[in-house]
Amino acid sequence: MPSGDPGLFGPGSAAWTIDREVLVLGGGTCALLLQLAHPAVAAGVAQHSDFRGDPFGRLRRTLTASYAVVFGSTRRAERAIRRMNAIHGRVRGQVPETGESYDARDPDLLLWVHATLVDTALRIYDRYVARLDPALAEAYHREARDVAIRLGVPAAAVPGDLGEMRSRMGRLVADGTVRVTPTARRLAPSVLYPTRFPPRVAWDAAHLVSLSVMEPSIRDAYGIAWSPARERVMRGAAAMSRRLLPHLPRALRDVPQARSAERRVRAAPAPRW
């Protein structure tokens, strides 16, 4: 691993600022359920992975690849992207509910998955970490855009700004392209209750942060209960989190991959004059 290599982003980037926060991981449930709400994504996951049998394994692999792209050296990030592209090349089939063919390399599918990750991370950061400066949010979108292109989305297809991306997501939900199918509902318990212990009530509590930023119509379609009282509780929890988080040491706030990346960059040899 080259010392001093900042990777694809590096210090000062929006990606390092936002993705370093452990709390952003709290959006995982939201992102996964939104992805599965696309019928073709749900079909691909059901037919080409052991998601129901090993949800933690899939989550671990996804996080490893994501953090390699964001915080890894350039070589490691590019290797992770090549691996993801190779996996996508093997995922194709038919959506059971419609009989339509799907291919994981379809730019529309890639763009939906990409959008769920970007949108969820920004919503979690803004609500539970710190109020998000619009310039930082747009920078995060631009940086993530480059990754989407490397993963096979044509540059012209990637929304030009965050507002356009979110508008596109809304249209896909409104016109029924994105909808919770029976396949998605069968997969959802593996996201919500991946193990028998701890009991379901504990898992329900663990998912509250994520579900609080989820599109309400999708949340309802999964049959996930929500209420004004629960919303008020999570609004208060968010305000408290934003107040307390700045007082915590970075060692408790940062994902290990971020600290490792910073050590790598600091290891750069001093220039010789």
Image (cartoon, rainbow, N blue to C red):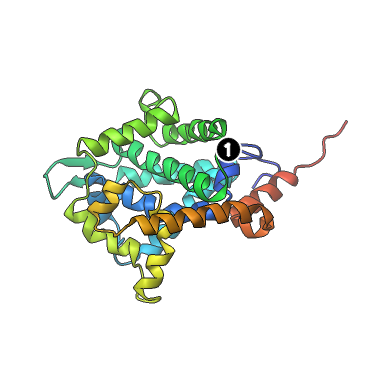
The residue that appears at 25% across and 53% down in the rendered structure is 220
Binning the other alpha carbons within 10 Å of mark 1 as few (below 14), some (14 to 19) or many (20 upward) gives many
Is 271 left or right of 216, judged from the image as shown?
Answer: right
In terms of depth relative to the viewer, which is nearer, 19 or 154? 19
Helix, strand or loop at mark 1: helix
Q: Which residue is mark 1?
A: 14
Is 164 left or right of 239, judged from the image as shown?
Answer: left
* Image location of residue 1, percent across then percent down: 64, 48
- Tell me if residue 95 can be seen: yes
Q: Name the image quarter holding residue 205.
A: bottom left
The residue that appears at 40% across and 63% down in the rendered structure is 57
Q: Name the image quarter holding residue 268.
A: top right
The correct choice, above or below, for 201 with respect to 234 in the image is below
* Image location of residue 266, percent across then percent down: 74, 45
Query: Mark 1: which amino acid?
Result: Ala
The correct choice, above or below, for 181 with respect to 138 in the image is below
The residue that appears at 35% across and 36% down in the rendered structure is 111
Quarter placement of the C terminus: top right
